[in-house]
Image: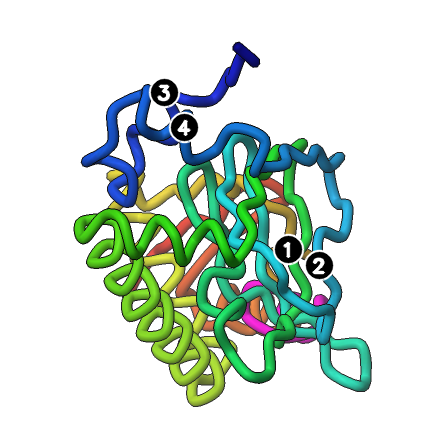
Amino acid sequence: MKTFNYMDIILSISLFKDFSIKELYSFLVDKYLIQSYGKNEIIYLQHEKAITMDIILEGEVIVQNIDKNGNILSIVSLSAGDMLGGNLIFSNKNTYPMTIISKTNTKLLKIKKDLVLELCYENKIFLAGFLEILSDKALVLTTKINSLSMKTIREKLMDFLIFESNRQNSNIIKLSISKKELAEKFGVERPSLQRELRKMQNDGIIDYDSKNIILKKR
């Protein structure tokens, strides 16, 4: 019997919670592909055809929109257990609307469309979970895009800083990403973000250095 090293990760995902190891293996045997990607490697280009439902086994990926001028908007980050392509493989236009990049070394489990259909047919819990993930994903992406497109850079920054201040339980916010990545998160160029940081510092709202932002007032 071929060894499958990621069975525990897969069984921990809500989609597969109703399967035993034996049942899941019987579905997957010889019907899956595990593919590895290095840090900052392109997994899918915008407009590339989606032919598999992918599950992240290890690592983290980021969904980015790149406009015709080369501006990058980071939409969402996904990590182990999250799904790619499941919302696309059954579409008449089954192409990725955005570029998918590995933020860290990443491994993906790739499952073909026919097997996804078989799993939906054989297991109602899988089907219900699959539909729930598709609905949640559409809502999250729509909300994120609307939020980013309507707010100013300062509003986006304040949302981020307040969230991180609450999460870190401190008004000294340690940045886990670079200023360039933060700018991409907001869909702006780095010089624009830097100008707004300076304005906020001059207005007495923040102080900052290369690794921290101190939130002085909200």
Looking at the rendered structure, the kind of residue marked 3 is Asp
- Magenta range: 184-194
In this picture, is 5 found above or below 32? above
Looking at the rendered structure, the kind of residue marked 2 is Tyr
Q: Quadrant of residue 36?
A: top right
Q: Quadrant of residue 37?
A: top right
In this picture, is 3 found above or below 65? above
The residues bearing labels 3 and 1 have C-alpha atoms spaced at a distance of 32 Å
Where is mark 4, residue-wise?
Answer: 26
As for residue 138 lying within the magenta part, the answer is: no
* Of labels 4 and 1, the one closer to you: 4
* Label 3 vs 2, first from the N-terminus: 3
Scheme of image coloration: rainbow
Where is mark 2, residue-wise?
Answer: 44
The residues bearing labels 4 and 1 have C-alpha atoms spaced at a distance of 42 Å
Secondary structure state at the residue bearing disc 1: helix
**Left or right: 133 in relation to 186:** left
